[in-house]
Image (cartoon, rainbow, N blue to C red):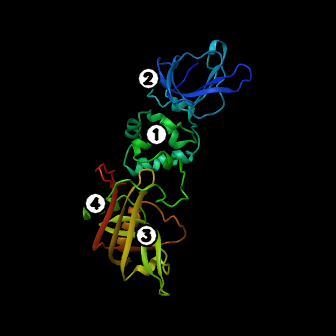
Amino acid sequence: MRAHLGDQLVIESPATGAARRDGEIVGLHHEDGTPPYDVRWSDTDEVTLVFPGPDAHVRHLDHGPPVDQGPLGTDTSEAEPPSEAAPQAGAPNPASEAAPQAGAPNPGDVGRRVAVERRRHGLSRGEAARRARMSPDYLAYLEEHPADPTVATLIRLADALGTTVTALRGAGVDTPPGQGHALLHPHLRDLTPEECRALLSTHGVGRIAVTTPDGRPAIIPVNYEIVDDDIVFRTAPGSAAAAAVGTDAAFEVDHMDDASSQGWSVLVVGPASAVTETAAVRRLVQHAHTAPWAGGRREMWVAIRPVRLTGRRITPADGQASTGH
């Protein structure tokens, strides 16, 4: 029997063969992954030292079918995802054995969200793996292939990437932020223009307020970039967002974290203009972080020159403010 950190140890009932107890392997005592193991039991959350008997088997990180056990508990499985634990010197690269070599990467939803958060923070895989206390090979496998990491793994990743387990799992993607409980002692403070610029520079989605040609107000979400301090986005001529051209536009960006009941918002006011000069348009295309999510032909670039920058942040009153996202 061999296991890696994060694998699941399952104890079956001798009578029925059904799982009687299970837990996460959180500690290894031998480099080759053989018993005994430190196991955190799912029913009590307690950690105990376990010498598995004949009624025990290991379920690996992908949570696939139980591993077949040969005589004397020998592991007869062939392929498995790479371990979270750092590989030993001289050992074969587990990623080369487990990860498919042909075709483009096909990550699962969790892997996609992990990769997006890692890139948003400007972290290499090696640095992110170090912060999350796992092998870079396992992080690469997680980002490039469908996987079902354990709760302990997700907790470490969320902490390393400054996000939450809920966000990495994608729960609540259809739920508007702000439904969490308010802080017991919230502190609302104004942001400096420098702080506002720093938060704007993280890129993403913002909302522009316009008056449409029929005279009605509208709030339009757009994918935006920051180029030479200007807020720029692509739209289609004649669209609602294009109505901002030639006006003093209001542009807003925010981030809310229901898990911690904290958040911030930034408001920009300034003149909006269409970018038409060929060299300037080419430069904006080169700086584009992402294509507009709405799709279609959106070849009109609009730039907002910030004249007024204001923002606010909600944090606990004890001063333990979170960092900006």
How many residues crowd mark 1 within 10 Å: few (<14), some (14–19), many (20+)?
Answer: some
How many residues crowd mark 4 within 10 Å: few (<14), some (14–19), many (20+)?
Answer: some
Whichever of callouts 4 and 3 sits on the residue coming sooner in the sequence is: 4
Q: Residue at x 41, y 66 (%)?
A: 224
Nearest the viewer among 56 and 187 is: 187
Whichever of callouts 3 and 1 sits on the residue coming sooner in the sequence is: 1
Q: Amino acid at mark 2?
A: Gln
As measured in the structure, the alpha-carbon distance from the residue carrying label 2 to the one carrying label 3 is 49 Å
- Give x and y (percent) for residue 179: 49, 58
Q: Nearer the viewer, mark 3 or mark 1?
A: 1
Q: Residue at x 58, y 37 (%)?
A: 100
Residue under circle 4? 195
- Quick one: SS at disc 4? helix
Whichever of callouts 2 and 1 sits on the residue coming sooner in the sequence is: 2
Residue under circle 1? 155
In the image, which disc is placed on residue 207?
A: 3
* Quarter in which the C terminus is drawn: bottom left
Q: Is residue 239 above or below residue 263?
A: below
As measured in the structure, the alpha-carbon distance from the residue carrying label 4 to the one carrying label 3 is 19 Å
The residue most toward the front is 184
Q: Are marks 2 and 1 in contact (CB under 8 Å)?
A: no
As measured in the structure, the alpha-carbon distance from the residue carrying label 3 to the one carrying label 1 is 31 Å
Q: Is residue 217 left or right of residue 62?
A: left
Q: Are marks 4 and 1 in contact (CB under 8 Å)?
A: no
- Give x and y (percent) for residue 133: 41, 33
Residue under circle 2? 88
How many residues crowd mark 2 within 10 Å: few (<14), some (14–19), many (20+)?
Answer: few
In the image, which disc is placed on residue 2?
A: none
- Give x and y (percent) for residue 17: 72, 24
